[in-house]
Image: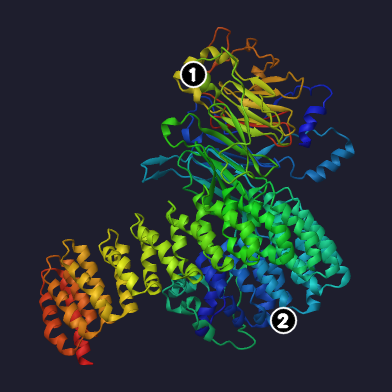
Amino acid sequence: MNGGDEVVTAPAGPPQPLDWKFSQVFGERTAGEEVQEVDIISAIEFDKTGDHLATGDRGGRVVLFERTDTKDHDALRRDLERTDHPINRHPEFRYKTEFQSHEPEFDYLKSLEIEEKINKIRWCQTANRALFLLSTNDKTIKFWKVQEKKVKKISEMNLDPPKAVGNGCVASSSNSNSPTLCLANGGSSGNDFSFPPGGLPSLRLPVVTSQETNLVARCRRVYAHAHDYHINSISNNSDGETFISADDLRINLWNLEISNQSFNIVDVKPANMEDLTEVITSAEFHPTHCYMLAYSSSKGSIRLIDLRQSALCDSHAKLFEEPEAPGSRSFFTEIIASISDIKFAKDGRYMLSRDYMTLKLWDINMDSGPVSTFQVHEYLRPKLCDLYENDSIFDKFECCLSGDGLRVATGSYSNLFRIFGCAPGSTEATTLEASKNPMRRQVQTPSRPSRSLSSITRVVRRGAETSGVDANGNSFDFTTKLLHLAWHPTENSIACAAANSLYMYYA
Amino acid sequence: MAMIDEPLYPIAVLIDELKNEDIQLRLNSIRRLSTIARALGEERTRKELIPFLSENNDDDDEVLLAMAEELGVFIPYVGGVQYANVLLPPLETLCTVEETCVREKAVESLCRIGAQMMEQDLVESFIPLVKRLAAGEWFTARVSSCGLFHIAYPSAPEALKTELRAIYSQLCQDDMPMVRRSAATNLGNFAATVEAPHLKVDIMSMFDDLTQDDQDSVRLLAVEGCAALGKLLEPQDCAAHILPVIVNFSQDKSWRVRYMVANQLYELCEAVGPEPTRSDLVPAYVRLLRDNEAEVRIAAAGKVTKFCRILNPELAIQHILPCVKELSTDSSQHVRSALASVIMGMAPVLGKDATIEQLLPIFLSLLKDEFPDVRLNIISKLDQVNQVIGIDLLSQSLLPAIVELAEDRHWRVRLAIIEYIPLLASQLGVGFFDDKLGALCMQWLKDKVYSIRDAAANNVKRLAEEFGPDWAMQHIVPQVLDMINNPHYLHRMTILHSISLLAPVMGSDITCSKLLPVVINASKDRVPNIKFNVAKVLQSLIPIVDQSVVEKKIRPCLVELSEDPDVDVRFFASQALESSNQVMMS
């Protein structure tokens, strides 16, 4: 809660709007290049320190990036301090490694194909320089360990490998049927073997020489067969030993070290599926309170759960809902109310939720309504009918908060994303495009009171047929949507995914 | 490269495979590390093998786990206890790996080695190792260090002891919950080695920190510490320091903590002694029995008998029994089931009058519970009640319920009842059994479920053993044999099975006169499965009956079956013939 107070009290006036600059791009598309479906990024996540970034894609791969600008940080900083230059670094990343996390599968019992698409990635506690992360597709969660391993080269052995292979004996050493190995494999026969007291001088231990290393990703555990529906979220607990996984109707609690059992802690499945009115869309643990978690629903509500109250948490501790404005109801009201993502702020006092049209910031101590609401792309409101017809209205946009809790960000169509200042009094509202020139569409407009962003005048038409221009000259392109983005935990740096490309910006 | 003599070849392979690409071979070599060590001799084991193992520790977890285990018993191979310290470095690195089970094994091995080490070696190498781990950069090392203090502490000089206590106190406040959990888990062990004055001050303040931790998972483990610490403290200190903590924990916000209290309550009571148990823990326990979380009630209900045993009957009747009554109608079937599994044990504690007056109605209501596990749990403990209230009352009040359960629609319930029938029969006596239960036993032989028919056949045999062949001839055998004409071949098969079980109990005469003709008759059955089962039964009858009977009746029948069109029938018939030949020859 300490950090939360900061947000409220610290700034005398709202912080200055940030000046965003392009930093890096990975997997940039060349003109006219066709995007392969499997390459489309489906998850982005910074680790707790911000030194690593992971992306997952529809092809089931996880790609890791590591920060490069802090590597020889100590020596550099001393120089910088001496020369009294302003430290003008911003996070820079480089490709570290990648691995195939999930493969397409087929569930024979239910005759269902299980896509390999990575739905979520979550980093776990680092230990001994090895990185740990959880990745999940629709059904199966996997625990990965990525570690540098020495490449072993054995230079000295008792048996000369080529010679031994020549006489056919060592070849059989890997064959357990071999009679020579009876001693090696057999139980008691070896103990009967008597050795001279001083040992046998002619035996030697293998000598391992090469100290070269390479990165190896190993799947340490597979948490499977616990979800009947598609997993939409995974989230680690602050206790370092448990995590949750949520699907449409249930939330399960796991111990990281135990993959064959989990506990169902939330079950919203009605006895009769025809009575189903609401599904779970996202769930996250509180960053510091090990007993608290929040989940959002397709009806636009967020429920806060206290794991201490009961083993089965079907009754929530707190319910956050925005009262419906009278007279505003339309056919789309319920659809666009559905929350696609929730995130806790680092201090744990605030929660951010994204529904189709807005970002909402909630104070967990105030369940009467959101603290603030930010309109993401109000100019689409007249277009809801089209968006419904081409199913875009069901797109699930993610949202994120800056490490200091002063700003929030989320994506939109035409590869745009928006950043809002959420400190009291801030009117910061920035629109950026995921491209090398993010500012070409940037317009500063006050986010509150909400109104349509008619002041966006510069129109950059992209090739796709589905793009259109509304009466105010706003362009939108349903096919290029920026769903996934993440804010660096300690610095003003954002990573976002436009199709198969990962763009990074700093301020 | 070295030339290896022929007899050394296997051991050379074993050594080379320490670095094989194939994990199975590496694992195999590590498991035979002692053989390798003996082949190298003690000195080279110390100077080459152990350093080699220390350097090559980025192997797969399975290999590391095996290594950690092997090193724990390696003292003889390095030249005895005076060289034990050479084993510490490889285990120290294993204490820092990420995989919990490897670390735990390494700690276990270190403890095992440390327990044998000489005091000076402990001070010079073991204690510095503990300190290094406790100051480790990664939480893995610090987690491991917590499990080593109880070995290091006793032999440390005074100044070092103070330092070790301070380090442990730091670990109890570590940033990482994993480390605090490990510190909480090991606090009891460590406390057992700490001198009484420090126990009261230093250890208790660490304990206080842990009991107020904001992570539920740490507080849970602190509950376990209560019992361990309580046993170390003087009773009055225990009442002063531990008791309030337990009472607090029993009202913790987190149901998991309360669950742990409920689970540990008996140990906690032992720790604080009988007087505080009565005055403070009874109310706490009653609260747990009425907890609003079913999991807590389950844990508490499961301890009800154990808890009552340390109380006097009046207290139990006054405070616990009302809760038990409530629990017997609890909304959670698991609570009722937990209660049912222990409630019988309360009978001896409460005595006959209270049992009849208070417990019996509860038994009866649980016996009629809609959830089969509840009923099963009651039935499986019936003998305990019998001892207290006597057979008359038992048969009057419980038998109708049992008869009802014997026809339960859940076959597992029926199975459980069948298994108790011989016991019941022996307690109820022949007369009662004939009246009420005899018919049921026959009915089970025709059950829809195989397991029940199988158990029923066994039951028939056990009854015959219990009441003797004469009784069986009157009450069992005729009814059983009647059923051989059942139109369903599976039921006929059950009868064949029963016959093979009954024959050894009934003896040669009855077998020849009554059972054998039925079996021979069945060999004319139209179902091949019956026929080859006849062959099997006949084979089992050969050792029981006279040689002449084998010759005259069994063999002709088998010969006939051995020419059956069905291949399985021929197979089992010829097998039976063969065994009859062997009997004849011997």
Left or right: B381 with respect to A423? Answer: left
Q: How many marks?
A: 2
The answer to whether residue A406 of the structure is visible from this angle is: yes
Q: Quadrant of the C terminus of chain A?
A: top right
Q: Nearer the viewer, residue A480 or B521?
A: B521
Number of the label disc, if any, that sits on residue B531: none
Number of the label disc, if any, that sits on residue A387: 1
Crowd around label 2: few <14 · some 14–19 · many ≥20 (10 Å)? some
Q: Quadrant of residue B353?
A: bottom right
Q: Position of residue A279 (x, y in %)?
A: 50, 32
Q: Chain of mark 2?
A: B
Name the residue rendered at 52%, 47% in the picture.
Answer: B331
Residue denoted by label 2? B81
Disc 2 secondary structure class: helix
Disc 1 residue type (three-letter): Leu
Q: Are marks 1 and 2 on the same chain?
A: no
Q: Chain of mark 1?
A: A
Disc 1 secondary structure class: helix
Disc 2 residue type (three-letter): Val
Name the residue rendered at 56%, 69% in the picture.
Answer: B348
The answer to whether residue B171 of the structure is visible from this angle is: no
